[in-house]
Amino acid sequence: MKRVVILGSTGSIGRQALDVIRKLPGKFKVVGLAAGKNWHLLARQVREFRPDAAVLEREQELYNLRRELASDRPPDLAWGRSGLENLARLPQADIVLVAVAGALGIYPTIAAINAGKDVALANKETLVAAGHLVMELVARNKTALLPVDSEHSAIWQCLNGQERRAVEKVILTASGGPFRNFSKEEMENVTVDMALAHPNWQMGNKITIDSATLMNKGLEIIEAKWLFGVSYAQIEVVIHPQSIIHSAVEFLDGSIIAQMGLPDMRLPIQYALTYPERMPGCCSRLKLTCLQGLTFDAPDTDRFPSLKLAFEAGKTGGTMPAVLNAANEVAVDSFLKRRISFRAIPYIVGKVMEKHLTVKQPGLEEIMEADCWARKTGVALIKTLVTI
Amino acid sequence: MKRVVILGSTGSIGRQALDVIRKLPGKFKVVGLAAGKNWHLLARQVREFRPDAAVLEREQELYNLRRELASDRPPDLAWGRSGLENLARLPQADIVLVAVAGALGIYPTIAAINAGKDVALANKETLVAAGHLVMELVARNKTALLPVDSEHSAIWQCLNGQERRAVEKVILTASGGPFRNFSKEEMENVTVDMALAHPNWQMGNKITIDSATLMNKGLEIIEAKWLFGVSYAQIEVVIHPQSIIHSAVEFLDGSIIAQMGLPDMRLPIQYALTYPERMPGCCSRLKLTCLQGLTFDAPDTDRFPSLKLAFEAGKTGGTMPAVLNAANEVAVDSFLKRRISFRAIPYIVGKVMEKHLTVKQPGLEEIMEADCWARKTGVALIKTLVTI
């Protein structure tokens, strides 16, 4: 029985992780749950899974949770970053699923690694902004960093039992999003609703927009670089609109190993939690003969400049990937608030990157400063756009 | 440096194996070569690769070879089944590639396994007819049986580093051959030339016809059962006309791992020879973005009854798979000689199977008797068809 902590249990990944756990009775014990503000759902999860500890982002929601659970035997309750970090270090935990969104996910990830926990990582910012620091800690603490993203899980599955030095390249597939076939002109008039209608995956708003700009794939490139120890020249992005091949690895003999399945996040979540075992799960099954045909295209970085920006930020390294991510976050937020156009998102990211003076080999503090600077710079830039 | 014996060096697989070895200088030493009647080519191969021993099928061609090589320092020369078996046991050999065609390939395969050699197996009859015996010997001698067939190599690559008990099923892909979209009526009028025009693979005549009837896939089902220790219920055949996904494995969590590449036999040959390593090879590379689209269909056992016959023979077990194979061989031979129709091939195989009294748990001698009986019965049946 694996003892699991889930950070971000009320979000999309967290809820699906609990679904996986629910459907594998006797395999897992949930020992800790952390959420943001959704104390209602967290209360229900606490009643169902009976963790030893639960954490919320702020004191006011924790107060509500405490009152809600008063009649039960409540778990240890805490709030804020220190609560989150303590939960990540919970002595009785074997594995910590980090599914909190945003740059703050870096802190509990580092806490869990330093406490020798295996980490199932669903937080993108951790490796994008601080890959060099995190991978060093993973090596030093001899823990496992298990990818949860479907693409990275696919690559990880394809690398199973293969020599790392035999890897020629990793092939990250991308659905291409809803604007895959849009012309440059059509992309001028993209609305928020159009961008939120992802063809294959049900996800949160931010990541759905990132899918539409291909920034999502850009961030995954940087994550893949750290997770699999490859160079950027060894990473290829291929547009695969059906999202059936979740990613692949090409070996130096020319053999390509690919991982396939229906687009269902519970599969990579389950694999990260049950690794190194596989278990009969709750995922819907792919039947090859039901497919309409699988196609592959090269990405167009002219229409999707975010992908190029991500490669550039990754190759520059230092604080630049953190800046890419932070600038993108504020730009997407403004787009979702209908303050800027879809095409302005990569424009803002590129402009913020241009202004940034990269710090080489930054520590965590410098990364967080760069993140903060990029947000401010991005917001200022957006204001100039909006007032024009 | 691996020391290699190649049985069947002048055939399609043998020549491609030597091409692989030629392009990986310093990695292999060819210590033995065996061919059928093509002493001309064998002489050239001996001059190039300088093996310690060479074997031909018959004394008369060996005489020619001996004379041809007289001016050189010739290798040890021998002929016939005993020559082949001795070569398979060659003390200095590490690995024996069995690429001789026909049921006789069983003998040197067994000789090599009993001598503790790793065997790269390209001879279909060995596992089809004698799978239960061969797998027992492999286990007893703790040798490795390495598949060379592109489909089995694909499955084997997909199983790398995975727990065997996590396998839900193996998915064997089939191009479907040139008559994939033919109606039953159109298949009545199939000619030898039409059947020999395989859309994707360049192979020998017998195997090309087997591809067109899907008997090739039928034989592979039986081989897969033995190679991967799965039940027939765990084997699925999927028609994939582009021959890019060479086969796949579905795991019990629903994840499918597939192996992809251009149709080039040198890739699986090389992987069997270099295993467990991968090496930069001579194979042309697949570029996903150059593909026109990958499609998948369920096989139609009504138009392709050979596939159903093979499943039946496999499930019946005992001497029945040997009978299936032998009856198919004489039927295909008669078709190639334009004596029977394309549709008569599975008809004959089915009729011979109907007449057969299966011997359960047969020894090698009983298998060979069943093979012999099936050939005679098949030939007699063909005569009645031809005279009608």
Image (cartoon, coloured by chain):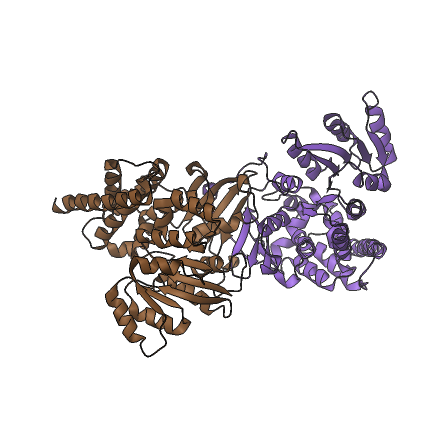
Chain colours: A purple, B brown
Relative placement, left or right, of A110 versus A150 is right
Q: Is residue B243 visible?
A: no
Instruction: Using the image as rendered, state which of residue B102 and residue A357 is in the foreground.
Output: B102
Q: Is residue B343 left or right of residue B248?
A: left
Question: x%, y% of residue A264?
Answer: 60, 40
The spot of residue A338 in percent (x, y) is 73, 47
Residue A277 quadrant: top right
Point out residue A384 in the picture as x, y percentages from the top left corner: 80, 56
State the residue lying farthest toward the bottom: B71
Count of number-bearing discs: 0
What percent of the width, then of the height, locates residue A238?
A: 57, 56
Residue drawn at point x = 55 percent, y = 36 percent: A284
Nearest to the observer: residue B322 or residue B195: B322
- Reply above or below: B172 against B42: above
Which one is in front, A311 or A299?
Answer: A311
Image quarter (top left, top right, bottom left or bottom right) of the C terminus of chain A: bottom right
Where on the picture, by quarter, is residue A316? bottom right
Quarter containing the N terminus of chain A: top right
Give the farthest residue toward the left.
B387
* Residue in the foreground of this view, choosing between B277 and B157: B277
Q: Please give left or right for residue A347 compared with residue A283 in the image.
A: right
